[in-house]
Amino acid sequence: MTDRPGTITFGELVDTAASHFGAKEALCYQGRRWSFTELRSDVERAAMGLIKLGVAPGDKVALWMPNRPEWIQLMFAIAKIGAVIVPINTRFRTADLEYVVRQSDATTLIIVDRSGPVEYLDMVRELCPELVTGNPNDLKPEAFPQLKRVVVVGEGHYRGVTGWDDVLSHLDNSPEHDLATDLAKRQQIVDATDPVLIMYTSGTTGFPKGVIQSHVIQQNVRDQAVRMGMTQDDVILMYLPLFHAFGLYEGPLMSMISGARMVLTTLFDPAESLRLIEQEKATVLSGFDTHFHGLTTHPDCKTTDLTSLRTGVLAVGMASSEAVARQTQRLLCPTITGWGMTEIGVCGTMSYLDSPEDDRCLGSGHPLEGYEYKIINPESGETLEPGRMGELCVRTYAMMQGYYKKPEETANAFDSLGWFRTGDVATIRKDGFVRFLGRYKELLKVGGENVDPVEVEAFLLGHPGVNSVQIVGIPDAALGEIACACVILKDDCQVSSEEIIGYCRGKLASFKMPKHVLFMTEYPMTPSGKIQKFKLKDLAEAAFKPEPT
């Protein structure tokens, strides 16, 4: 395994980018623009504001806000002063927020007051009634014993919390030299191997775990930049949420590393994204098949000038992603596929710019430098020969430092030789090309037979009325588990459950056939665009719960 340690910290990355790219535009958001020099200035000002608030080295600082420039400024500022960034999913509500803030031991929670219909401050007040009477800089509420302060980014002024604008304005009344000296001292003692991120996985199953990553993870982004041919002439359109590793790494980190300009949006909206591609001459896109499907099927796609697009990351491998990938090559641009996890980096494998279309649309790519892979039999642990399907295992310099405060889960994730067991079903060709096929925990066990939901999903996509389909297992007294097809039909199509099941009859083995069909208009999704199969299972189980005897 190649050792590829990082050499600089996140904070030093900002300084280096400003030194190299200076007055070149770094960021565009809603028509406002920042150069790399201006962005560094805002980061340093934010860092001094955090020091003035009392944020100490090693403190966990949680960010709960949609994409906006302050997210980027605060993220790099937190890293500069040796604290740890805890991004929080903006789709979380009170129960999820309470878990993450408490489990992460966050001392500072930075939020927006509201965004659209979502009242973030109201939810925090519900969990922290101490905001009404407590000391805004020493809260220690009952629900969060470690939490000292809640900081609100926004124009309003609220009791019990600290306004971020007020923090910045008060800097003007402070001895600037002292704060700048403190910042320089703090940044100097930060080491690249120190923790910088605790990212709570937005997985498709179970409750999230806090993945600890150090500054070293940026080396993964550097190697991605090489594989993608990134230069300072590129323009990254970033609509993915920054609290997710995909958005954070392919957006602000990639921009600072390559000098590419980043055009940031608050949310993913296909119409806005298409408009910005043409207006800002975007060259690079990233996302899951849901994002590329939204772009390629939008009516504006046919009338938008997309000639600036050069490439993007579209992770594929499962048969159900092929159609979107092929359409993307025709209508948008050639993409690069990849595979990764929060635990090991966004892309631990990637194809190349000149890879054959089949490799870019049907697989997950070749290993990046510093990554090694093997396929094992998940039951015996035996290493399988090339071409055999099994569980994907990985070793890399970019491996997480562990799951925060979960030593047992951390230990169970590795074997005795340090291989991380991903839980993913995959194959590896003789030339090292990896293909991700799905999650082992999503395999169904029907009457003792293993059923791969991806296989059934790919088959049902051939039905003329089916737009998309997800297979989940629901309990059955006789067989242990049976398949349920969660189907979204094409517009103006009328199809019955019997027709869907009949389509499989005689073509699929009986144990693979869905026994129930749940028609839907949309799937429950993670903010990063992944389908939450555990929620689909809950819906299917509720819909087809056996009548009590």
Image (cartoon, rainbow, N blue to C red):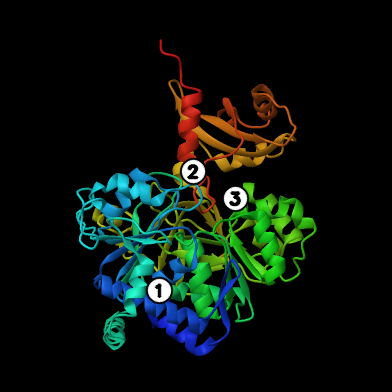
**Which of the two labelled residues, at mark 2 and mark 1, occupies the earlier sequence position?**
1
The span from disc 2 to disc 3 (Cα, nearest Å) is 16 Å
Which residue: 31% across, 68% down?
Answer: 84
Residue 205 percent across, percent down from the top left:
42, 44
Mark linked to residue 318: 3
What residue is disc 1 on? 76
184 displayed left or right of 505: left
Residue 112 picture quarter: bottom left
126 relative to 221, above or below: above
Residue 315 percent across, percent down from the top left:
58, 58
What is the secondary structure assignment of the residue under circle 1? helix
What is the secondary structure assignment of the residue under circle 3? loop
Which residue: 19% across, 56% down?
Answer: 140
Mark linked to residue 394: none
269 relative to 81, above or below: above
Query: Which tag is nearer the camera, tag 2 or tag 3?
Result: 2
The quarter of the picture where the N terminus appears is bottom left
**Which of the two labelled residues, at mark 3 and mark 1, occupies the earlier sequence position?**
1
Which residue: 69% across, 60% down?
Answer: 274
